[in-house]
Amino acid sequence: MRPAIRPGSRLVLPAVASALAGALCCASSSSGPVHAPGDLVFPDGFQWGVAMSAFQTEGHVENDWTDWAAAGKAPLLGDACDSWNRWPEDVQLAADLGVKVFRMSVEWARIEPQEGAFDEAAIAHYRDVLTAVRKAGMEPLVTLHHFTNPRWVAAAGGWADPRIVESFKAYAAFVGQRLGDLVDQWNPQNESVVYITGLSLVNTFPGGQIFDLDLLHRMFRHTVFANAAAVDALRASDTKDADGDGKPVVAWLVHATSPTYPADPENPDDVTAAANWDYLYNLAFVNALVKGELDLDFDRKIDPTIDISGLHEGIFDELKGRVDLLGINYYARNFVMASPGLIPNVDALPCVNGMCGDLGPVAGDNGNEVYPPGLYRALKEFAPFGLPLTVSENGVADAADTLRPAFLVQHLAQVHRAIAEGIDVRGYLHWSLLDNYEWASGYTMKFGLVAVDFATQARTPRPSFALYRDIAAANAVPKTALDQWTLDGIVAAPGD
Ligand code: GCO
């Protein structure tokens, strides 16, 4: 879920792909596929996958978003992809794609419809799905919270209320205990910062407000602690090593990254604003769960003596080290303009809805700029945390599938570029396997490698399905694909 981004002034750079072609060429293992000169070969064991979420695919869930939609704030969910019933077909499609990672989520409202009352039938359902995923040779990556809450959580104040820490922890402990023999890869929450800022600044989630700083501070604080508590609960409850690699729990932080750029690079206030927004949006949450540093007023200083919305900053042992792998979700970059006083210490506002000028030449159906070098920039930005990285979401709204092939190939070229520079990128998960319920856009935005006819539920692979299948099978982006699938008119900022 991303606001439309409107780029400001930019510099033109030549296509990166051809310059990179061959950087890792011919590095495949002797038993692997044969590669031609100029192919972008990924390291052995690179994890190809797809990503999706429960609410967006299952259909007929009852939770806080359902109520929000019923109140007219978003399109009604209805059947979605009917994946609650058609999951065997979906698992088979992913298997046919040849990917090895199947990112999915479990729906809290189904598993714990009332506080403390867990639904065994829901768990049995997810066990069937996970068993099938593993049988099909894929490793599941399971998210516990992908933007939606049971009604009782919302009624208790949701993620702005400190009780979320205990309730999320109890849910994580239950799921870890019941599914741990089938799952090693866990992600407590999808895109926490999108959720926090969407709810407290731009009112894009149930219970949302416009620029409510008190809400921002409370959401940030409790969400950080809830994520850390969920990791602790998973580490304690899931002692079963499903894939035999000696690690029963790999805690992912699936993070929405959006590299920031000043709306006007000549304007020093915009330059500062871009750096400040980068800190708030990209770095502060990761700092908390990796280093234990909780900075609630986003001034880059930890001062336990100050009171922010009744809360205190600090460096906390109970936050530190709660991430084993950083998941990088990347769709678009953010242009940022100075906006003094709007958020103290940040004084910045990302450009949305044409605020910073015209859209670039290439855009998805939702108006998002397509800018592959931003993925390279994101991987470079997060490498210093010293954790392995995986691209946990990247995709484009493109019903016609005319843009997706080049989107895919050129973003993968940027992943390859990062790896060639020594950045530890372990995998790439494409969003998404299927067209699905795209939040406020409902069924209008088509992110699937597989098209879904929502009247008949027929699934039809788009041409880019075969392209991605061949890339995954070859563990390489062939030079022929790089030459065929170019993005004209992409311009890159200095350093990108
Ligand atoms: C997000 C989510 C997905 C979206 C996807 C496309 O990034 O908001 O994880 O739920 O559907 O990103 O916008």
Image (spheres, rainbow, N blue to C red):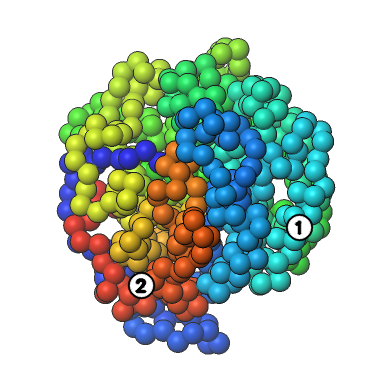
Tell me the tag on residue 127.
1
Q: Is residue 370 left or right of residue 82?
A: left
Alpha carbon distance from label 2 to label 1: 42 Å
Q: Amino acid at mark 1?
A: Arg
Identify the residue at horizontal 64%, vertical 42% (top origin): 61
Locate residue 154, reporting x and y percent: 64, 27
Residue displayed at 17% across by 34% down: 266
Q: Residues within 10 Å of mark 2 (few under 14, many from 20)?
A: some
Residue type beneath disc 2? Ala
Query: Mark 2 near ligand 1 (CB under 8 Å)?
Result: no
Q: Mark 2: which secondary structure?
A: loop
Depth order, front residue of 173/13: 173
User: The N terminus is located in which quarter?
Assistant: top left
Q: Earlier in the sequence, mark 2 or mark 1?
A: 2
Vertical comparison of 132 with 269: above or below: below
Marks 2 and 1 in Cβ contact (< 8 Å): no
Vertical position of residue 5 compared to residue 489: above or below = above
* 167, 413: nearer the viewer: 167
Q: Secondary structure at mark 1?
A: helix
Q: Quadrant of residue 89?
A: bottom right
Question: Which residue does the numbered mark 2 point to in the structure image?
Answer: 23
Relative to 493, 348 lies left or right: right
Residue 233 x, y percent position in the rendering:
76, 41
